[in-house]
Image (cartoon, helix red, strand yellow):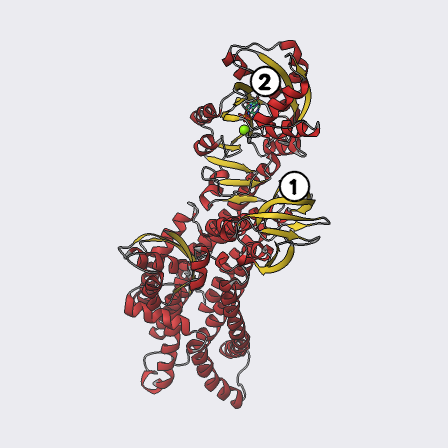
Amino acid sequence: MKRIYKISGMHCASCGVIIEKTFKKEPAVKMAEASFGAESVKLDFDESKITAEALSKKIEPLGYSLILPKQHDHDEHGGHGTAMADPHHDHTRMLKEEELGAMKLQVSVLMPLAGVTAISMVLDALRSTGTVSELPEGLMLFFKFALPLMAAYALFIPGKMFLKGVWTFIRHRVANMDTLIGIGTGAAFVYSLVVVLFAEQLKNYINVENIYFDVTIVVIAFIILGKYLEARSKLKTGDAIRQLLQLQAKTAILLVDGKEKEVPIEEVKHGDLIVVKPGGKIPVDGVITDGHSNVDESMISGEPMPVAKKEEDGVISGTLNKQGSFVFKATKVGSETMLAQIVKMVEEAQGSRAPIQNLADKISGVFVPIVMIIAAVSLALWLVVGYQTMPFSQAISFGLMSFVGVLVIACPCALGLATPTAIIVAVGKGAKTGILIKDAATLEKLYKVDTVVVDKTGTITRGKPELVNFINVSRRSDAEVLSIIGSLEKKSEHPIAGAIIESVREKGIELKEAQSFKAIEGQGVSGELDGQKYFVGSPALMKKLGLSPEESKVAEFVEGGATPIFLATEKELLAYAVVADELKDGAVEAVANLHKMGIKVVMLTGDDKRTASFIAKKVGIDDVIAEVLPDQKLEKIKALQDTGKIVAMAGDGVNDAPALAKADVGIAMATGTDVAIESAGITLLHGDIGKLAKAVSLSRVTMRTIKQNLFWAFIYNIVGIPLAAGAFYPILGILLNPIFAGLAMAFSSVSVVSNSLRLKLRKL
Ligand code: ADP
Ligand code: MG
C-alpha cells in the first residue's frame, strides 16, 4: 500500500537520497521516493512484513524519523498517513513551527556573536595593513579569550547538528550537507585550537598569528541564519494545505427526530440529515433534501460567483452557505469528501518528483563525496604546489581556507530546493483556483503542450442547455411525447438530459420509470415505456435506425449553433427537439489567450458538424472535428500526436476517459464531487476553457521558475567551488574567505525559495 509520510530531520536534498537508499535496502519496501521540498517520503511496502514504526527505526540512527499518524486516526478513517487523518490539527506544521522557534532563538544569539567577531576581524585587518599600530591591551585580551569561547559555543550548541553529520559519516558512511559544514567548521576550530595551545612548539613552522575561530563562528551564524530564513519561507510554500484544512468545519448540526443536535464532524455518517444555517459552513458532501440557498464555492472551485442550490443539488464540504438555510443528506464523509480528496491529491502532488529534478538529484547524490575529495585535493595542492611559491605558513593558511571554503560553499541545498519548492507553490496555487494537479510530471508535460483539444459541451459552452424548440410530428399529445423524452433522459448523465428534464418538469408533466435504459455513447439513449422501445438522440442515431428527419425543420437552429435531437421508435420519428447552450463567459478570451501562448485549439465533439462549426467560429477556434463517437476521440488524439503534436485533451472524464488517457495530458472537467479521475493528470473543478488556459499558464510560469532556480543553483556551485578552492588565485590573486562562502551558501538557498514563493503572486 502506498503511503506518504512526513519526515523530520531533513536538511537538504542529499538527505532525501540517503533516506531513499536506506529504505530501498529493505526487502519489504517496493518503492521509496523522498521529497526534500515536501519533507516527506512516499513509501510502498508490504505491511505484513514490516511496520511503519520499524521503518522509522531504520532511519533514526541517521538522524531522521517518520512522523507517524496517531493510532486512532488509522482505525477511524482507514487514514492514509496524511494530515487529513486529523483535520483540525496540523501536527507536522506544529512541529515545524516549534523547530522554527528554536532556530530563531539560535539566530538571535549567533548574530550578535558574529557581530563581535566581525569587529575583531576588522581590527585585525587594520592592524595587519598598518592602519593602526597598537590596540588597547584589554581589547586584545578580550578577543583572545572571547573568540575561542564563542567558536566553541557556535560549534557545539547551534552547530551540534553539523557535528552529528560528521558523526553519522564516521559511523554509517553516509554524508549529507551537515557533514560538509561540520567537517569544514570543525577543521577550522580544531586547527585554531591546536595552534593556540601549542603556539610555542609550532611557531617555527607556521604562522601562529593566523587562527580561524572567526570562521567557525561566522560561517555557522550565516548558515543557521540561512536555514532559518529558508525554513520560514518553506513553511509558506506549504500554506495551501493548511488553508484547505482550515475550510473543514469542526462540527455539524444533525437533524435527529426533528430536533437539531450539534455533533463533532467525525460522528457524521452516511445518510445523516444535516442542517445548514445562513452563513454556516457545509460540513460534509451531500445532496439537499429541503430548502434552497446560494453557496459560495470559491474556496473549492475558484469560481467567484455564489452558486444557487435547491433540492437535489449537491453540496460540497468546506464551502460556505450564504443567506438561505437548508437540510441535506450526507453522502460522503470523512476521507471520502471532496475536500479530503483535494487535500490528499495536493499532498501527493506536492511530494511527487518532476522529471526535470532528476539531474539535480543525481548530482546531489554524488555531490557530497565529490566535494569532500575536491576539498582534500585543494588542501593538498596548496601544501604541495603552493609551497613552491610561498612560505609554508602561508600555504597551510590558504590550504585550510580552501578546504573549509569548498566544504561550506558546495552545499547542494539550492539545487535540491530548486524544483520541489516551485512545484509545491504551483500545486497549491492551482488548488486554490480549482486546478488540481495529479503530480509534478503532469505539470512539466503540460508546459510542453502545443495543442489543446477541447470538448464542446461544458468546456466551451455552459453545459446547461435549454430546450429552445419542440416539434411534435406524431399523433400523440405534446404532453405525452415530452413525458416519454423526459422519462428516458431522467436516467442519463448527459448535460442535454438535464436541460430537457428541466423544461418538461416546468410544464408540470409527470415522468415515468423507463425500463431497460441504455446510454448510447455519444449518440443518445434508449429505453422502454409500457413495453414500447424508444430512442432519443442525435441525427447519427436516427440514421442508424434508418430514419431520416426533415432537414428543413432543424436547419435554421443548427446553423445558429443549437443541437438537434429526436425522439423515435425503431420505425417511426415522433418528435424534433432543439437544445441550445450558451457560450461560457470568458471562453472567447481564453481561446485568444491560448492562441497567444502559441497553442492550437481544436474542438472535438460528438455534436452535429454545423452546430459545432458555429460555436467554434464564435469563440475563435479554427479547427473542428465533429460527429465523432467517444471511442473515435482517442483515434483523433492519436492522429494529432502522430503529426508530432503534444496534445492536452480536456473532456468530462466520463465517456472521454480513453481519450484523456491517450493524450499527453488529460484534463478532466469535474462536475460531480469526484476529484480523482484516474485517466486525468489535471482536474478542473467547474472546469472551462478559461481555467484550462490558466492551467497552461501555471505550468509555464512554474517551469520558468524551476529553470531559473536550477540555473542559479548550478552557476553558484560551478563558480563557487573553484573560487573557494583557490583556482582563481594564480590568475586573479583572489581566494574566497570561507566566511563569504557561508554567506553565499545561505543566500543561495534563501533566494531559490523566495523565487519559488514569487509564483504565489503571479497572475495566471
Ligand atoms: P460532446 O462531444 O459535445 O460532449 P457527446 O459525445 O457527449 O458530445 O454527445 C454527442 C451527441 O450525442 C450530442 O450532441 C447529442 O446529439 C447526442 N446525445 C448524447 N447523449 C444524449 C442524451 N442523453 N440525450 C439526447 N442526445 C444525446
Ligand atoms: Mg461529452
- 637, 720: nearer the viewer: 637
> Residue 26 occupies which quadrant of the picture?
bottom left
Disc 2 residue crowd, few under 14, some 14–19, many 20+, Cα 10 Å:
many
The residue at which mark 1 appears reads as 311
Q: Residue at x 51, y 53 (%)?
A: 334
| Amino acid type shown at disc 2 | Leu
Disc 1 residue crowd, few under 14, some 14–19, many 20+, Cα 10 Å:
some
- Mark 1 / mark 2, whichever is N-terminal: 1
- 190, 666: nearer the viewer: 666
| Amino acid type shown at disc 1 | Glu
Q: Secondary structure at mark 2?
A: strand
From where the camera sits, is residue 582 visible? no
Q: Residue at x 40, y 70 (%)?
A: 162
Distance (Cα) linking label 1 and label 2: 29 Å
Image quadrant in which the C terminus is located? top right
State the residue lying farthest toward the bottom: 138
The residue at which mark 2 appears reads as 567
Q: Secondary structure at mark 1?
A: loop
Ligand 2 picture quarter: top right
